[in-house]
Amino acid sequence: MFSKRLLGASLNPLMLSLLADGPMYGYQIIHRARILSDNQIQWTNSKLYPLLHRMEYEGLVVAFWQPSESGPDRKYYKLTANGYKALDQAKQEWKAVSAIFARLWGLDYAFG
Amino acid sequence: MFDLEKAIGSWRRQFRYSRLFHKEDLDELERHIRDQVDYLVRVGRPEKVAFQEAVREMGGLVEAEPEYRKIYWMKVQHKRGVLRELRWRMAMLKNYVRIALRTLKKNKISSLINLFGLSIAIGCSIVVYLFLQVAFTLNDFHEHGQEIFLVEHLIDREGDRQAWGTSPIPLGPAMEAEIPQVVRAVRIARHWGTATLNDHVFSDRIHFADEGFFEMFTFPLQRGSTEALADHNAVILSEPVALKYFGEQDPLGRQITITFADDHQASFTVGGVAKAFPRTAEFAFSMLINYETQRDLGIKNLDDWEGLTRATFIQLREKEDIAEVAAQMDRYRALQNAATEDRAITAFAFNNLRDPAPESYEVNMTIISGFHPAEMAMMALIAIFLLTLSCFNYMNISLASAAKRLKEIGIRKVVGGTRRQLIGQFLTENILLCLFALLLGVVLAQGVMAPALNAMNGDIIALSFTENGGLWLFLVGLLLGVGLVSGAYPAFYVSSFQPVTILRGQQKLSNKKWFTRSFLTFQFVLTFITMVTAVTFSLNMRSMAQRDWGYQREHTLVVELEESSQFALLRDEARKHPNVLRLAGSDHHIGVSEDEIVVTVEGKKIDAVRFDVGPNYFETLGLRLTAGRFFEEALGGDASGSIVINERFVEAQGWTEPVGQSVRFDSTVYAVVGVVEDFHYDHFSNPIDPAVFHLTSEFRYLSMHLEAGTGVQTDAFMERTWKRLFPDRPYEAFFQDTVFDNYFRDGRDLETTFTFTAVLALLISCLGLFGLASQNLAGRMKEISIRKVLGASVPRMTRLVNQGFLLMLVLAALLATPVSYLLVSALLDAAADYHIVVGPLPFMVSFALVLVTATLTISTQVYKLVMVNPADVLRTE
């Protein structure tokens, strides 16, 4: 498990990166994150949905309802052009941070 | 059998009353739960367990709400849900208001106390606001006010710099002609004149101003044209004067004959009538005539640099030009100083009409002095002080009455009321109360306080909601300010209780007793201070009224003459009257007029006041000789070379043998022939300066010392005589003991203001005390009943219940004593040069007054205590 602070800081970029693969609904996002991180990232629903709503308000994602075969409609979120821009910026920032750590901790970290 | 649809339906119901979740949000969350249930069922859990697990993971309303609240407003705007939100808020507000009204009705006494105290304080604040509004916007209505400056001059007197608002007569035109930055200069002069019209004789102040007056100042006319000012034979009237002279008739084109001093007379045609002047006009006019007319009439030599005019205003192209103008003033200084060596000017100064310098009130003879800052500060302090007292009352009473409402608070919290809502409810209650107080305060201000202030200060304020936008803002601000300040602490404190503690009956309020009591103590400290101030000023006024003026002020009638030739005629008639014991003429008169001169003694210059008087003046006024002699009619030499001085003069020079000393003024050397005891020629706010009496045969006053008790009769006789001798002149006379009436009236006004404040403070504090004492008693009824049953005596219980309050009063008295001593001494020093020494009497009187009132207040509770039947109280348990 990551620390709460790290989780908080990485929440936005992670969400953007996950949605970069294509539209997803909330349940799907949580599962993807859990699988990708070997259960190290466990978002609670009470945090996830308000975050998605905020990103929608900020214009980073758009939401749309789509019928589903197994029950009621699902609400999907997908990145907007602004969302992709924000993702690029986040990538650069995290790469820069990662490069600094690589220089600090040596090559075995970078290739390890 | 578990039904998933039913279970989901009941899960959704918990969110029904939370406005933070929209339907769409719940659909989304529901879908999430369904997905999770599907997944868990697929991995082998029974449907019921799967649902419970999914819901647990989802979290309830309590966990979700804070996160959803954070983005709620974004969503409201986003989804255009503002209307819905507003509806919800209004519903809540309606609920708050309903509960508030019920609570106010239920607690009648404490509501009335709060209402009454607050409305008094609010009424005072409104009046003070209106006063300050006028004080801060004086003369602001002049459109060019920014560019208009009053020319002042400074003179050095023994290292003491004095500023004067008057200026040399030829200065204005010279500046207009020679300094390019000066667009126009306008001089203003004033003379008394007597106007005769259809057999009526009016005495009025006549103003003279240069032609540019109406271009410079914003005084619009209702009739006629401002060009009339250019006409030397025209006069422009103010609205009241036009009404006084012509009533409802059209004054335009009518003739008014005006007689000025020394019998200069001329006829003027009415060329215009001004609109009513704004309340903020510090100077205006009653009858306005062209400045140069003074020359035609022979009243004044207008080319003489020695002569001063009432005021000279200059209008510049731009406000910033003033520095360049100031740099060019040296030549005028030289001209002026060549003309008046004794009164050399150090520099000229300029005071902007829109933003006058803060120390303008210190400038001598200025026509834009503004209000004294101390007066403004005092008014503001009184208002803040009364507001503070009433806010304390509210806090105290609502904290004390919170005890009664603990269960309500507990229940509200248990059924889901948040702290924020409780605070909202308490504040609504308070603001509602403040609103009632505000309405009552407006009525009080309009009906009582504004008329009282206008009676003291001249008609300066008016409560007008249609013309005064600032007043609305002020009232709304006052409502919110007072409502929040007085309500915030009780609201936050009371809403912080835990429901469990409340409902178990364990919530204790007693730890806040010191808090309410220290508030009340502080209130009484303030009350004591105002009380001591009021009593001291009252005693001071009494002492001043009895103060020796240094001469015989009773039984002295003074008739004002218009010209010296009237004196002999009137004197001969007066001498025949048996009630007239002594009489004398004079050019100046003690308490009414004097000249300010510079006297040179042994090469040193000192300021002095000069009285030109006739023979027998000293004897008639009863001035007391301490050395030498008075003027003697028989000694011909007195007229030219002798003076009588006062003791202050002797003191200032350090003479041991004053008689025979010589002094110089008006380029003449005079010998001192006598010394009189110091006397008050001015009221007691001002120090007695060195004074010089000089013999004259030009008289403007006839003073008569009368047989005691014959004043009215002799006055009537003199008036008849006057009317017979000078039928077309108004008779003006006064008794010598009335010359300081204005001063005493101001003093009484100040006394009234302080007394008023003290009484209000006492009233408000006692209301607070009453509220607290009755709450205290109500809370201890059970205890008291049990004590009664067990046989406690009434005196013993009275002491038990009230000793805390009495101790508090004593503590307040102890704290207030040093503070009020310092304050009152400082106030007296600031207000007057001659005043009483602050002794123990005001303190004793104030403490007695407050203690008696407070004891009376508390004793209403003793009655309750005596009357209570223990059975009634204890039966309810």
Image: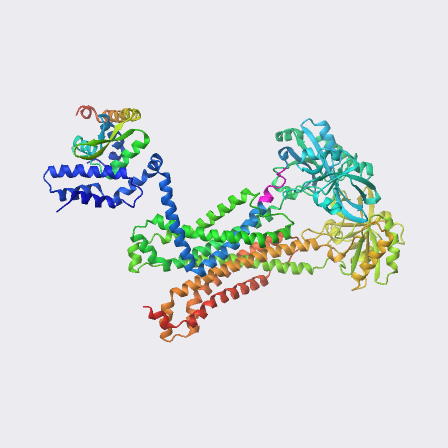
Position of B800 compared to B839: left or right? left
Location of residue B683 with respect to B876 vertically, above or below = above
Q: Of all residues shown, which one is farthest toward the bottom?
A: B791
Position of B422 compared to A96: left or right? right
Location of residue B575 with respect to B184 vertically, above or below = below
Give coordinates of residue B285: x percent, y percent.
71, 42
Residue extent of the magenta highlight: B133-141
Q: At 65% from the left edge and 49% from the top edge, which residue is drawn?
A: B458
Give coordinates of residue B209: x percent, y percent.
73, 37
Where is residue B358, by image quadrant? top right
Position of B289 compared to B768: left or right? right
Which quadrant of the figure contains the C terminus of chain B? bottom left
Location of residue B735 with respect to B671 vertically, above or below = below
Where is residue B56, by image quadrant? top left
Location of residue B345 with respect to B661 vertically, above or below = above
Count of marks placed on residues: 0
Q: Is residue B585 visible?
A: yes
Give coordinates of residue B86: x percent, y percent.
38, 42
Q: At 14% from the left edge and 46% from the top edge, which residue is drawn?
A: B2
Figure colour scheme:
rainbow
Q: Is residue B632 visible?
A: no
Does the magenta segment cover residue B136? Answer: yes
Give coordinates of residue B777: x percent, y percent.
41, 65
Position of B378 compared to B5: left or right? right
Where is residue B716, by image quadrant? bottom right
Does the magenta segment cover residue B714? Answer: no
Q: At 38% from the left edge and 66% from the top edge, which residue is drawn?
A: B780
Q: At 11% from the left edge and 37% from the top edge, which residue is drawn?
A: B42
